[in-house]
């Protein structure tokens, strides 16, 4: 058993996740990414949990094919259970040796079945390619569900039209079936004509609302959602339509004990440095989606994750009032944070002020480290750092001409004066949630240690309560 808020296989990484619930157990299947052994094939591995913090690692459950088979890479898909209790797994089969007419690798849909969710029988006779009108090299991530219990099964896919503007062919393709073996083309579920591709699509229902979740990498690399009163759409965008920031990607969800649990991976960065390029795959992390009265979704840390650390830590930082109407003020704790910590901070921040928030892993002066900055005027939460460095053949410090980490900002309503910040830190991982509604997940490499502090910039801020724990 592995007990932690996050899960990373050793020595590999967690790729796209496929969460599934059976008999009250949350199964998180994932693409087992062997970064140090490229070209060796991708299989599905499995971890399970009954409490969201204790993980049982079952290892490989869907082996990839050989170099001579179409499923050398078993990529993202989904799992459903039929009326007879048989489990059906649908995945993306890809092998660079099997190509489309233009030379790009084909992407096909594969099928397997199981009686125990651990041992799967493949059915290569059911594998199929994209129907006419779709790009055969962009036909992946099959998500199967049954919106009407008396109707046919539907399969949604990250697909692209075979013709049209190169960057706007992405569509949520759709097929239907009555037996989970043979599939017929149907009109796309959502065809906005604005994305390269909408990866890892899924549809689920909470109350009277239906949600379409997808991951896009056209103008941004982020997981988003749309809403509708019907599983057919039309799909409208809420004001805040992203689940998290750049680093939490390919997120999919499952209903567990009446709650919507979201699983995704927190990406690593090349060279284990804050300015390194983002890499595909990383560490499994969970969030919980909670609907508001208007149907929009709040994303929070599951209470089980926040409650797992039980040893109280004194960071040497007491409730404090900072007045900095036309300047800057800060207060920094006397002791270093442990490498693993859960933090809850209650703040009062002037809604008309420029910024205020937490200093993380900072030095005694509050100068070098990370800044979790709330900006009421801009309506966002930002993760910043100082110094802002660029690493190459040389290292040098940059002043104001390099901004904060642009992909680590989250839109947020900061019009109210009181806010709660929940943070989980573990080594180079951080998940921060504002007001149990706005999540920001990322890596912290350059400053592995440091203290906790608060600051205000052209604003007044009061730290009204602080609670820090560790395992």
Image (tube, grey):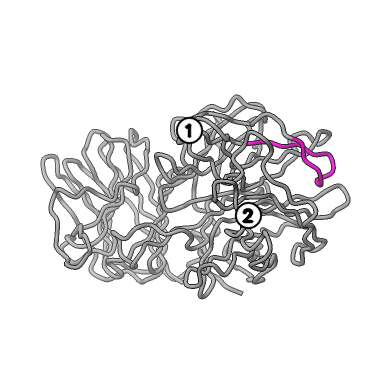
The residue at 40%/53% (across/down) is: 432
Query: Where on the picture, by quarter, is residue 21?
Result: bottom right
2 or 1: tag closer to the N-terminus: 2
Q: Is residue 104 above or below residue 282?
A: above
Q: Which residues are magenta?
A: 173-184
Give residue 212's position: percent from left, percent from top.
Answer: 59, 36
Q: Is residue 301 above or below residue 131?
A: below
**343 left or right of 55 in image:** left
The residue at 34%/45% (across/down) is: 409
Label 1 environment density (alpha carbons within 10 Å; few <14, some 14–19, many ≥20): some
Q: Is residue 458 above or below residue 274?
A: above
Give residue 211's position: percent from left, percent from top.
Answer: 60, 35
The residue to which callout 1 is attached is 168
Q: 53 or 129: nearer the eye?
A: 129
Label 2 environment density (alpha carbons within 10 Å; few <14, some 14–19, many ≥20): many
**Image quadrant for the N terminus?**
bottom right
The residue to which callout 2 is attached is 18
Q: Residue furthest top?
A: 234
Q: 238 or 43: nearer the eye?
A: 43
Per the model, the C-alpha gap separating discs 2 and 1 is 26 Å
């Amino acid at each position: 058993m592995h007990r932690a808020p996050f899960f990373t296989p050793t020595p590999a990484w967690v790729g796209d996740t496929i969460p599934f619930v059976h008999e009250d157990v949350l199964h998180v299947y994932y693409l087992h990414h062997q970064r140090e052994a490229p070209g060796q094939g991708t299989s599905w591995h499995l971890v399970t949990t009954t409490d969201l913090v204790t993980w049982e690692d079952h290892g490989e459950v869907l082996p990839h094919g050989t170099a001579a088979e179409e499923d050398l890479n078993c990529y993202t898909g989904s799992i459903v259970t039929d009326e007879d209790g048989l489990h059906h797994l649908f995945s993306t089969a890809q092998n660079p040796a099997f190509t489309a007419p233009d030379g790009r690798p084909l992407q096909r849909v594969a099928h397997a079945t199981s009686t125990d969710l651990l041992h799967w029988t493949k059915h290569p006779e059911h594998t199929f390619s994209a129907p006419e009108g779709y790009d055969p090299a962009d036909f992946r991530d099959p998500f199967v569900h049954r919106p009407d219990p008396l109707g046919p099964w539907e399969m949604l896919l990250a697909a692209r039209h075979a013709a049209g503007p190169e960057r706007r062919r992405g569509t949520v393709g759709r097929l239907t079936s009555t037996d989970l073996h043979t599939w017929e083309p149907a009109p796309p579920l959502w065809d906005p004509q604005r994305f390269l591709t909408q990866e890892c699509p899924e549809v689920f229902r909470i109350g009277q609302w239906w949600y379409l979740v997808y991951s896009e990498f056209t103008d941004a690399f982020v997981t988003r959602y749309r809403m509708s009163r019907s599983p057919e759409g039309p799909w409208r965008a809420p004001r805040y339509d992203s689940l998290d920031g750049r680093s939490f990607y390919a997120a999919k969800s499952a209903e567990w004990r009446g709650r919507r649990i979201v699983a995704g991976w927190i990406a690593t960065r090349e060279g284990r440095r804050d300015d390194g390029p983002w890499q595909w795959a990383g560490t499994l992390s969970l969030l919980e989606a909670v609907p508001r009265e208007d149907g929009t979704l709040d994303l929070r840390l599951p209470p089980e994750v926040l409650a797992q650390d039980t040893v109280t830590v004194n960071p040497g930082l007491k409730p404090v009032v900072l007045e900095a109407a036309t300047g800057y003020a800060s207060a920094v704790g006397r002791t270093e944070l442990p490498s693993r910590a859960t933090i809850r901070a209650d703040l009062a921040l002037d809604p008309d002020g420029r910024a205020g928030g937490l200093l993380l892993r900072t030095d005694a002066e509050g100068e070098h480290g990370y800044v979790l900055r709330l900006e009421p005027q801009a309506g966002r939460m930002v993760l910043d750092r100082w110094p802002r460095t660029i690493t190459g053949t040389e290292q040098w410090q940059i002043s104001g001409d390099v901004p904060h980490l642009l992909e680590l900002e989250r839109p947020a309503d900061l019009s109210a004066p009181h806010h709660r910040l929940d943070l989980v830190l573990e080594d180079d991982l951080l998940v921060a949630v504002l007001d149990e509604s706005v999540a920001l997940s990322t890596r912290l490499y350059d400053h592995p240690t440091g203290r906790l502090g608060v600051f205000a910039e052209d604003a007044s801020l009061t730290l009204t309560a602080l609670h820090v724990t560790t395992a």
